[in-house]
Amino acid sequence: MLYIVIAFLFLAIVLYFLLGGADFGAGIIELFTSDRNKDRTRKTMYHAIGPIWEANHMWLIITVVILFVGFPDIYSNMCTYLHIPLLIMLLGITARGTAFAFRNYDAVKDDKTQSFYNRIFVYSSFVTPLFLGIIAGSAISRQIDLQATSFMSAYIYSWLNWFSVTVGLFTVALSGYLAAVYLIGETGDDNERRRFVRKARIMNVLVVIFGGLVFIAAEIENIALAHWIFGNMVSLTAVISAAISLLALWLFIYNGKKKIIRVFAAFQVTMILLSVGYTHFPNLIMVKGGQNLSLLTNHAPAKTIEDLGLGLLIGSLLILPSLFYLFYSFQKKNELI
Amino acid sequence: MNDFIAARSQMAISLGFHIVYSCIGMVMPVFMAISHYKWIKTGDPVYKNVTQAWSKGVAIFFATGAVSGTILSFELGLLWPKFMEHAGPIFGMPFSLEGVAFFIEAIALGFFLYGWNRFNNWFHWCTGMIVGVSGIASGILVVSANSWMNNPSGFDYINGQYLNIDPIKAMFNGSWFSESLHMTIAAFAATGFAVAGIHALMIARKKNVQFHTKAFKIAVVFGAVAAIIQPFSGDLSAKNAAKHQPAKLAAMEAYFHTQQYAPLVLGGVADTANKKAKYGIEIPGLLSFLVNDNFKDPVNGLDKIPVKDQPPITITHLAFDLMVVIGSALMLIGILYFVALWKKRSWLSKKWFLDLFILATPLGFIAVEAGWTVTEVGRQPWIIQGVMRTSAAVTPMPGIQYSFYLFTVIYFTLSIAVIFLLSRQIKMVPQLYDKVN
Ligand code: HDD
Ligand code: HEM
Ligand code: HEM
């Protein structure tokens, strides 16, 4: 059962990166769209993510719940040492979620309030994945110091370091990239499609640049990232296949095979997560000096894991088909319009 | 402000904010489903307009409820890491099922909000219904988690260790039923009266009368029924508190000395220095009766509880009285509504009758906040009754007061924003939802 719970944990994390990430990305794309085209882009975006908006964010809740029920040590240490970035991420989520809903449901659509919501939405769309990335980076950066005695070393340096910050920027670029690729298939307008393709390319270049920066930052902080990723077959294969799918994606991007390019983009991101996740498994949080926090040792008692796994299995029988149907029906209906 | 007080205040303000949205998230989908059903059955477009107008409001509330809920699920760890480290595996089961229920709710909401003219009417109706059912299920589940904190079970606490954990037993602890029942009814009473009050105001102002009357009727029936049964369920909760949390019960009642024919004190303030309730009206024997079902048997008072294990008495007592006063008032208004419906139809359009409902608009939610104050403050100094003290659970991170200030500002701003949006919705009813009238 423990492995089933862990599988769900990874599933939830990956899906949150993919779906929530594309969601954040939509705001990032909006941030970098010229004023002239903003309205159109916003419409396409709204059409695409409106119905699935709330559901995408549920993966974060599922992740948190699995953590605090199944791996309470990991959850409580994370919450203690990464309190500040978590707080900022929550602020971002709050600002985005409310601004997105408010701008769509405000009964009066005047320019002043709309542009106010828009501004909040785009900036928080940038901040949220940045801090999500910082948290992810900090978890593996070995900067969390369970023995820390000063405020700075316990609560600030745990996440404010070159490595975590570059991982944050990398996450922002990935989100923008996912959103651009996703939106290419959502528009019927040729001009607009061309714009999204260009955005996807720019984002892709950024992904590569920030990816490079992550490696450099890892060197600065003495993190053996290169060794982790190139030092074992699985991670290496994952990275190589991500690179191949990147090239393949460009072959298909122009003839508008939206399913194929989406699969490639999702595959790429999954492979990136896999290559890092695999080397560390079962450690979820790597700490300075001491004992890492591992999914295989720092878990809840057996009975809890048993029940949690069962709950997740039954829950997923209900959730996955209906979620699939939600995506499917709005895809299909959108094509008709 | 020290970190401990700041953490408690932050938790309180977050929950106090969230609970409003969760009540609405549980109940409004049910109202919408009724109105939607009437539209499908009768074809009367006013019902469709009511459903659509409500659904916009619900979307606004849902988004705010969802983000405040997300904040809460992190706050449990951000503020109380030691509590979650031990309690997570024990009382986490309802939270994980709640996660499933939310997920289904969010999916169904996507179908419902964006499904107008896209799906078969009945399929569309069902998705709305699923939103309501899973909302209520999540409410029950999360309250059962809270009831575990009041009445922990499903583990053995031996030498500071939590052994033989059984999450299912913890979920079905001795208080889950009375607490979830009372909360679910409260959600219907509070939301029913709030919605009815807003529509009554519009009727009184002669705006879109037909539209608002239909909306008023749906809301008021639920609110009135809930308000009438609420005190009975409250009695069950009080008996339960007497059994498992005598300190809480004694504080609620400002009841200091264990005695036979224990009196019920209505109103008044707790004079903790002299250990008695001042200015209240004493009804001898009533407390004994409420707790033991006879007027004689003694009820344990605060003198049986060591001072270091006593909750804050003044707050708990005042909050309890406030809840009971409002509960009695809403029950009377509820009864009055049914009297009007059956015998005095003419009252229904009278100004004083509408005014009554307009005045009652916020009462249910005030009672909800007061009730939670009784439950949570009355449990102090324990975070897990009898097992772990709240002060032992708080995060070691200093400077929590800044995060408390920050959250206070955020919730304040969000409340203003929601009120602003809601008033705009209501103002736009003639243009958007009810053009004819
Ligand atoms: C509309 C709201 C509302 C109304 C009218 C009432 N209550 Fe209530 N009460 C709540 C809303 C509420 C609540 C907010 O929902 C609480 C907090 C925790 C819970 O489960 O329900 C609660 C808790 C609560 C508790 C504490 C339970 C515990 O901590 O174990 C007691 C003893 C009562 N109630 C009793 C009553 C009585 C005797 C009422 C008689 C009129 C009453 N309530 C009306
Ligand atoms: C599952 C549901 C709930 C859980 C797990 C929970 C948990 C907690 C925790 C961990 C604390 C901090 C410790 C303390 O001071 O008691 C707390 C305090 C508090 N909670 Fe709850 N709570 C829940 C429901 C609610 C709700 C719905 C409200 C409603 C408004 C509420 C109101 C409060 C208040 C007012 C305090 C502060 C108590 C004080 O200052 O003494 N709680 N709760
Ligand atoms: C510590 C306590 C709590 C936590 C951690 C929590 C967590 C959450 C989360 C994560 C959501 C968002 C789900 C979504 O996106 O749909 C949510 C919403 C909701 N919560 Fe809470 N919650 C708590 C207390 C409560 C209480 C006490 C109740 C009810 C009595 C409640 C009832 C609901 C409902 C009905 C929703 C649906 C949202 C809506 O329709 O607005 N929650 N909660």
Image (cartoon, coloured by chain):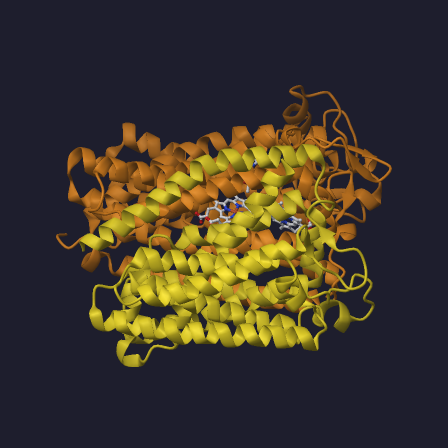
Chain colours: A yellow, B orange
Q: Where residue A318 sits: x, y (%)? A: 43, 36
Q: In this view, does A279 lie to the left or right of B104?
A: right
Q: Can residue B80 be seen in this view?
A: no
Name the residue nearer the viewer: A231 or B432: A231
Name the residue nearer the viewer: A54 or B125: A54
Quadrant where the N terminus of chain A is found in the figure: top right
Q: How many marks?
A: 0
| B287 relative to B315, above or below | above
Q: Quadrant of ligand 1?
A: top right
The residue located at (71%, 62%) in the rendering is A81
Quadrant where the C terminus of chain A is found in the figure: bottom left
Q: Where residue B179 sits: x, y (%)? A: 58, 34
| A294 relative to B186, above or below | below
Q: Where residue B213 sits: x, y (%)? A: 24, 44
Q: Where residue A173 sits: x, y (%)? A: 47, 71
Q: Can residue A2 be seen in this view?
A: yes
| B223 relative to B422, above or below | above
Quarter of the image holding residue A159? Answer: bottom right
Name the residue nearer the viewer: A19 or A128: A19
Quarter of the image holding residue B112? Answer: top left
Q: Is residue B189 left or right of residue B170?
A: left
The residue located at (34%, 72%) in the rendering is A113
